[in-house]
Amino acid sequence: MNKPETGEAPEAAHGRSDLQENLVEVLRQQAAISAVLRAIANSPHDLQPIFDTILDSGRRLSRADTGAFRLVEEAGFRLVAEVSPDVLEEIPPPVVHGSFHDRLIASKSPFQIPDVAAHEL
């Protein structure tokens, strides 16, 4: 009897590697969602721990060293959580019509800026 080969075709090994990477990413996302839901359940009347957890989870998922969580208000952005405050500067209100921040506010969507230094603030 012939013994079956134990080696895989390179394409199959690569496909499995991609699946494993996808699984790891999905598990990281689920862990982040769970952390935020726990913060909400544990602090229903105090938003600060929730904001801190949202920022920390987002920062870890995007593999960022620093981060800021700002709420959009009529006068501009209100900083509610930050990591590495010595690196991040407060964005001054009010937001100028047509500016980078004005366009972000108009989008009404969450966003990540990979390199904030690359944008005219």
Image (cartoon, grey):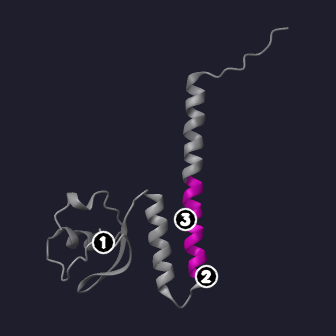
- Place of residue 31 in the rendered image (x, y in percent of width and height, measured from the top left): 59, 63
Residue 32's mark?
Answer: 3
Question: Which of the two discs, 1 and 3, sits closer to the camera?
Answer: 1
Q: Residue at x 57, y 33 (%)?
A: 15
Quadrant into which the N terminus falls: top right
Q: Secondary structure at mark 1?
A: loop
Q: Residue at x 43, y 57 (%)?
A: 62
Residue 110 appears in the rendering: no
In the image shown, does 4 or 109 lie closer to the viewer? 4
* Residue type, mark 2 in image: Ala
* Circles 1 and 3: CB atoms closer than 8 Å: no
Label 2: how many Cα within 10 Å (few below 14, some 14–19, many 20+): few
In the image shown, does 63 or 22 lie closer to the viewer? 63
Q: Residue at x 72, y 20 (%)?
A: 6
Q: What residue does disc 1 label?
A: 86
Residue 87 appears in the rendering: yes
Q: What residue does disc 2 label?
A: 41
The numbered mark, 1 or 3, whose residue comes first in the sequence reads 3
Taking the magenta stretch, the answer to whether it contains residue 30 is yes
Q: Residue at x 18, y 79 (%)?
A: 95
Q: Secondary structure at mark 2?
A: helix
* Residue type, mark 1 in image: Asp
* Residue type, mark 3 in image: Ala
Provide the residue span drawn in magenta: 26-41
Label 3: how many Cα within 10 Å (few below 14, some 14–19, many 20+): some
Quadrant in the rendering for residue 16: top right
Cα separation between marks 1 and 3: 25 Å
For the stretch drawn in magenta, the main secondary structure is helix
Residue 8's mark?
Answer: none
